Amino acid sequence: RRSRVGRMTIEDELGILGRIACAGLVASASVGQVGAVVTVPSDQAEWSQLLLSVARHRISGLLTAAIESGQVRVTDAQYQDAIDAQRERMTACLLLEDHLVHISTTLVAAGIDVRALKGPAVAHLDYPDPSWRVFGDVDILVRSRDFDDAVDAITATGVERRFPELRPRFDCRFSKGVEFFAADRPEVDLHRTFVMGR
């Protein structure tokens, strides 16, 4: 059975999302012929639903890139909607990057070697344009031996751990990481490793 979102089927929506996600790639057998132009629905309800899906999958940067390269065809009004959505996402990402710089500077000042992970790092290292990669939090990696000191340094900036440590020195030996939050600041995930366990 072909499910529908308005007059656009789920399969149609996924096909458009696939083309958007492949913006800038040389080839992709999974989404059809590279270079094929996709025209998005002109129906406002279907376009709004597509924009929600783009936001949920964090590909608003790729949508604007695909529109600007001619891979996805939209109306002028839809292009403005896409630009507005991307501007909103990039404002949030710039605030996250600012927070990443602040936390990283704090850790380095405490003598802790730090690496940025995931969103901001991937955006700047792996994409032709960092604005193509939307992300939602800050992820930092430190060595196990520095983990407790890093927790103390981050806590001193006025954020709180999401969960308490199970027992002293548990996190630096077994935990994957610790999440920090504050009402007025983005979430920070401090990683010791990528998976749970010693």
Image (cartoon, rainbow, N blue to C red):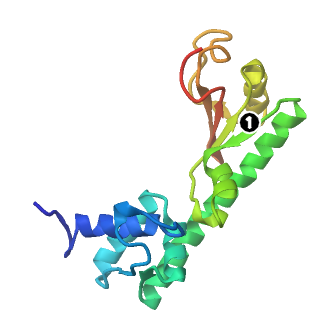
The residue closer to the viewer here, 139 or 197, is 197
* Residue 152 lies in quadrant: top right
Q: Give the image quarter of residue 141.
A: top right
Classify the position of the N terminus by image quarter.
bottom left
* Quadrant of the frame with the C terminus: top right
| Position in image of residue 173 (x %, y %) | 65, 13
Q: Is residue 83 above or below residue 149?
A: below
Residue 52 visible in the snapshot = no
Residue for badge 1: 158
Q: Residue at x 53, y 81 (%)?
A: 69
Residue 44 vs residue 164: left or right? left
Image: 150 above or below 6: above
Q: Examine the rendered structure and indicate whether residue 17 appears above or below residue 75.
A: above
Q: Residue at x 35, y 65 (%)?
A: 31
Amino acid type at image mark 1: Gly
Q: Which quadrant holds residue 111?
A: top right
Seen at 57% across and 68% down, the residue is: 88
Q: Position of residue 118 (x, y in %)?
A: 61, 45
Left or right relative to 166: residue 13: left
Assign a secondary structure to mark 1.
loop
Looking at the picture, tell me which residue is in the foreground, 24 or 147.
Answer: 24
Q: Residue at x 42, y 63 (%)?
A: 28
Against 23, is 147 above or below?
above
Count the numbered circles shown.
1
193 and 28: which one is in front? 28
Rendering coords of residue 161 (x, y %): 63, 29
Foreground pick, 45 / 4: 4
